[in-house]
Amino acid sequence: MAVPHATDIRNHWYWRPGWGIGSRFYTWHITFDGQPEVEKLADQYRSLLSSQPSLDVIPNRWLHLTMQGIGFVQEVATDDVDAIVAAATDRCSRLSPFKLTIGTPHVNPESIQIAVDPIEPVRQLRVAIRAAIADVWGQDRVPEAAEPYNPHLSLAYTNTDGPAAPLVEALSTAPKISADALITSCQLIVLNRDEGMYVWEPYATVELGS
């Protein structure tokens, strides 16, 4: 089923609560290093998206699928983070690696997104990560709501407010391509957005089915 395009866009880069220059945040992502089909797909859209002044296009090294936050570095004890990683390592070892198909992009109010298919393995992985956090902090302290959660890969972020029509029109000329990715792990990263892009340092990787 096709995902509807947004009718308006808004600047993604406003400062959300707690964020500012120098902020660092622990969060779980699926990253796409070593996934050549995904990088090829992003490359094929890059020239089209880069021609749109309302977009900041994501470099291949920062492509990701957002999973689950833990909290700001200054607010979370390192011992707790390490305990969460240990719990996640155990829980994720019980899950099997899975393949994702990444297809046609659409305009979201704050980004150009591509839905992934199937979504159920991603949801199961996120449930395992959230359960690992609950193992350490208790169910009532798991950050972020369980729903709504819509797994997706972003190709670009919007940097202004305005109508979405120019972006919808641009995407209508894009080739219909897809990419497959084999997901064998999930990464805990230390995220920042100091330079107008989400970038990170890796903290830990947990393997699926290990």
Image: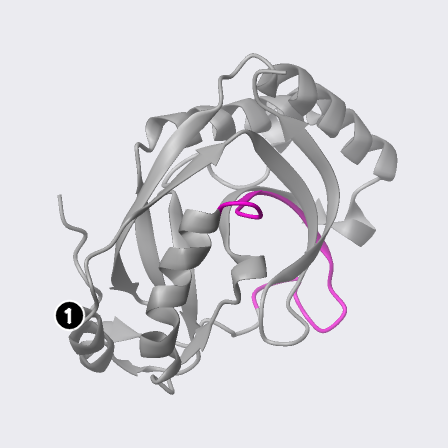
Few, some or many residues within 10 Å of mark 1 (<14, 14–19, 20+): few
Q: Is residue 146 above or below residue 189?
A: above
How many numbered marks appear?
1
| Residue 36 position within the rendered picture, expressed as x and y whole percent measured from the top left | 47, 49
Asked whether residue 20 appears in the rendered view, the answer is yes
| Residue 154 position within the rendered picture, expressed as x and y whole percent measured from the top left | 41, 58
Magenta stretch, main secondary structure, is loop
Q: Nearer the viewer, residue 139 or 11?
A: 11
Q: Is residue 34 left or right of residue 105?
A: right
In the orientation shown, which residue stands out farthest toward the top? 94
| Residue 56 position within the rendered picture, expressed as x and y whole percent measured from the top left | 46, 76
Residue that badge 1 annotates: 172
Asked whether residue 110 appears in the rendered view, the answer is no
Quadrant containing the C terminus in the rendered view: top right
Q: Is residue 55 above or below residue 60?
A: below
Residue occupying the point 45% across, 56% down? 39
- Magenta residues span 16-35
Residue occupying the point 72% across, 73% down? 21
Can you tell which quarter of the image residue 92 is in?
top right
Residue 162 among those drawn in magenta: no
Residue 30 among those drawn in magenta: yes
